[in-house]
Image (cartoon, rainbow, N blue to C red):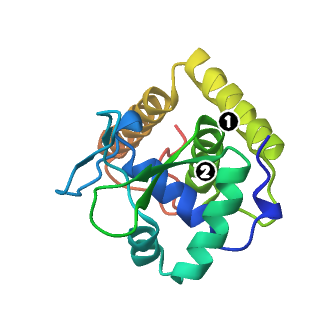
Amino acid sequence: MLSVESYPDGTDKILVGLYKLDPSFGGTYDNKDEIETNDDVLVNFPTRAEIADWTGLSKQDVRYRLDKLVDNGVVIAHRVDDGHGTPSYHYHIAMSGVEFVRSTTAMRRVLGEVPGNVRVEHLRELAAEVEQLREELDAVGGLDERVEKLSDRLDELQDDDADMESVDGEDDDDGNPFPPH
């Protein structure tokens, strides 16, 4: 189970970025220089330098974080030797990192932020609570349907109020729209 608190600050940026770029999860990596490995497997994932560019972290900081993530199986590194100089490494996120990113993304969407020292267990609990709330709302017609019904009812009440004013037209002397008989 991934606990990002054991990683240096900024590690979550790397994970979120790798997730968003990974075509396996609907991302798009816009590197036009696709490189084939010796195994004829297409490697089209970012390098450390590219990750440093879009996270704003230094290359050394990115390397340190990626080394830890790779050692723990959260990120997968592919060594690519194109025959020109030093081989490069291309990185993509593993499933344990995907779970973390999806959970933190959901938390950020619900809370507007991700509180510090959050563990995956906390994110799972929050996701379960959100899912339970969603099911409860769906059971009573869903939030959109309920808002629409409430809006319709308010319109009806407003129409009824307008109809009541038009029946009498004027208030009596004490401001009562229904004068005594």
* CA distance for labels 1 and 2: 8 Å
Label 1: few (<14), some or many (≥20) within 10 Å?
Answer: some
> Which of 73/26 is in front?
73
Residue in view at x 38 percent, y 32 percent: 152
Name the residue type under label 2.
Val
Judge from the rendering whether residue 126 lies leftward or rightward of residue 158; answer left or right: right
Q: Position of residue 162 (x, y in %)?
A: 33, 44
Is residue 123 depicted above or below 140 in this figure? below
Count of marks, rendered view: 2
Mark 1 — residue? 130
SS category of the residue bearing label 1: helix
Judge from the rendering whether residue 106 lies leftward or rightward of residue 158; answer left or right: right
Q: Position of residue 61 (x, y in %)?
A: 61, 78
Residue 113 is at least partly visible in this image: no
Mark 2 — residue? 110
Contact check, label 1 and label 2, Cβ < 8 Å: yes
